[in-house]
């Protein structure tokens, strides 16, 4: 839960290490974060999925291409 909350931080020094740690854990917490109401949390989660490069997340990435937030869409496109 703490890592997921750190994704909400606007400070890169806080959310970037959290993304790295979540990538090491695997896709499950990142997928959970994609359901967050806050767009910056979803964008950071998608950034993590892009770094993870797990082909089993392709369906979720494809759906995220239609997210209301442009950063979520950008990271989905880069994934």
Image: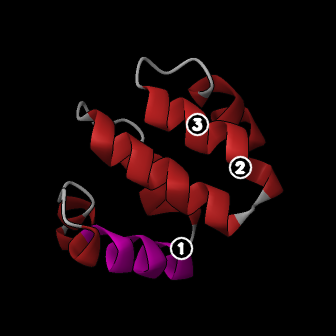
On screen, residue 45 versus residue 5, left or right, reads right
**For residue 40: magenta?**
no
The residue sitting at the right extreme is 55
Q: How many marks?
A: 3
Span highlighted in magenta in the image: 15-25
Mark 3 vs mark 2: which is more N-terminal? 3
Image vertical order of residue 16 relative to residue 21, above or below: above
Residue at the disc numbered 3: 74
Q: Which tag, 3 or 1, sits closer to the chain's start?
A: 1
Q: Are marks 2 and 1 in contact (CB under 8 Å)?
A: no
Find the distance from the CA under tag 2 to the CA under tag 1: 13 Å
Residue 51: horizontal and vertical position, in percent? Answer: 64, 66
Q: Nearer the viewer, mark 2 or mark 1?
A: 2
| Mark 3, other Cα within 10 Å: few <14 / some 14–19 / many ≥20 | some
| Disc assigned to residue 79 | 2
Marks 3/1 in contact by CB < 8 Å: the verdict is no
Q: Which residue is mark 1?
A: 23
Residue 17 located left or right of residue 5: right
Q: Residue at x 56, y 30 (%)?
A: 73
Please name the predominant secondary structure of the magenta segment in the image: helix
- In the displayed structure, 27 sits above or below 66; it is below
> Does 71 sit left or right of 14 as displayed?
right
Relative image position of residue 50 (x, y in whole percent): 65, 57
Which image quadrant: the N terminus? bottom left
Name the residue located 75 percent from the left edge and 61 percent from the top edge. 54
Write the residue at 17% across / 71% down. Answer: 2
């Amino acid at each position: 839960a703490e890592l997921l909350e750190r994704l909400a931080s606007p400070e890169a020094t806080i959310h970037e290490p959290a993304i790295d740690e979540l990538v090491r854990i695997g896709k499950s917490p990142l997928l959970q974060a994609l359901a967050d109401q806050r767009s910056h949390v979803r964008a950071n989660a998608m950034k993590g999925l892009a770094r993870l490069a797990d082909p089993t997340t392709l369906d979720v990435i494809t759906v995220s291409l239609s997210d209301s937030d442009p950063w979520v869409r950008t990271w989905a496109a880069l994934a």
